[in-house]
Image (cartoon, grey):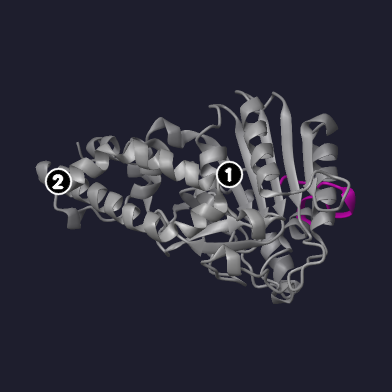
Amino acid sequence: QVFTKTLSLLPKFKKGKDLLRSHPILYTKNQQTMGFFNKLKNAASKAIKEDLLKSMGIDDADDGGMTRDEFEANKPDELRKDIRMISGCADRQTSADVSNVSSFQLPDPAGRAGGACTSTLLKVLYADERVPEEDLSFTQVLEQMRRHLKEGGYSQIPQLTSMNPIDVEAKFDLVPETATGVRRAVMIGINYVGDEPGELSGCWNDVLNMKKYIVDVHGFEEDNIVVLMDDGDNTEPTRENIIEAYRTVVAHSEEGDAIFLHYSGHGTKLRDDDSDEADGYDEALVPRDFQENGMIRDDDLYEILVKDLADGVHLVSLMDCCHSGTIMDLPYMFKGDGEMGEMILDPDMNLDAFIEQITGKLIEFLQSRFS
């Protein structure tokens, strides 16, 4: 009865949580209480899943991991959007690990866990402001990025994640030929000027160099590019401004359009308050005003960028920061380590929680999967 009552209250629970998220300091202070209700909610969901599998004659122990074909055959339509992300390092390649925003300090960039992704990608795709003479595959691009990073003394392994499986031997392109509509971009570079430790030096250049590339090579127009940098000239990359820029670009895009998102700055980890992360942490972006207004969690990003994205819009995000491997919580992954031959379902991802969070259709998914 407690489980049933909990599930019936989930819509109100989510509304309350969303209100708390809009007030980051209050939200941070209430994480312990929120964690209790999240545990109760997840216990209810787990119990109902077990009952459903039992009613279908399936032992929960037999559930196991999903195959790619199984997931693709049964996943809800909301999980078929054209979303991809390129990141500079896996989540375990970190330079900070925090659970309390009020005590968070920016990591020392001398740790070099992030910051080289943009420059190495451009070295592969636009060296000397020229595109390669021959088309490169996704595999070739990521493996060449890894080689350049290694030569520069960096440990990160470039990673591609996606909502849908991608043929990694196909031609790499930020904008596919099928995206014939308007091309829009939101580009964010944060150097954290004056912060000690933590001030960066290359994030503005990352944005300016990548902007030149998408304009010259992919035909993006100035009027459709929003730049946020803490340089005193562009829009300040505060939490509110970043979220507003993301909401606006998604709201204005429709079928056939393309979106490019670029973030160069600090990333971090926060203790997971939804129990939807296998490692117990949410990945997060660090806006300029993080001390006053908090971080932007991966949960926030897919609420804004994934759930509200119109069908038929092509979205690519380049996340050049620490803890960026799964910051958009996309289920498929490919690492440019020279060992992976194809995209796989992320073995560390809680797919049940992901499906429920994005679509609210976990029970329907299980029914279709095991019918």
Q: Is residue 359 left or right of residue 325?
A: left
* Labels 2 and 1 touching (C-beta < 8 A): no
Can you tell which quarter of the image residue 268 is in? Answer: bottom right
Q: Position of residue 43 (x, y in %)?
A: 25, 53
- Toward the viewer: 62 or 317? 317
Q: Is residue 170 left or right of residue 183?
A: left
Magenta span includes 132: yes
Q: Nearer the viewer, mark 2 or mark 1?
A: 2
| Residue corresponding to mark 2 | 51
**Looking at the rendered structure, which numbered label has been put on residue 84?**
1
Three-letter amino acid code at the position of disc 2 = Asp
Dot 1 lies on which element?
strand
Note whether residue 27 is visible: yes
Magenta residues, start to end:
123-135
> Image quadrant for the C terminus?
top left
Depicted 164 relative to depicted 284: above or below: above
Q: Position of residue 24 (x, y in %)?
A: 56, 52
Q: Badge 1: how crowded within 10 Å, few (<14), some, or many (20+)?
A: many
Q: Position of residue 183 (x, y in %)?
A: 73, 30
Note whether residue 172 is visible: no
Q: Badge 2: how crowded within 10 Å, few (<14), some, or many (20+)?
A: some
Dot 2 lies on which element?
helix
Which residue is depicted at the point 65% across and 56% down?
A: 292
Depicted 165 relative to depicted 273: above or below: above
Depicted 184 relative to depicted 233: above or below: above
Which residue is depicted at the point 29% across and 52% down?
A: 42
Depicted 205 relative to depicted 83: above or below: below
Three-letter amino acid code at the position of disc 1 = Arg
Q: Position of residue 239 (x, y in %)?
A: 66, 48
Residue at mark 2 to residue at mark 1: CA–CA distance: 35 Å
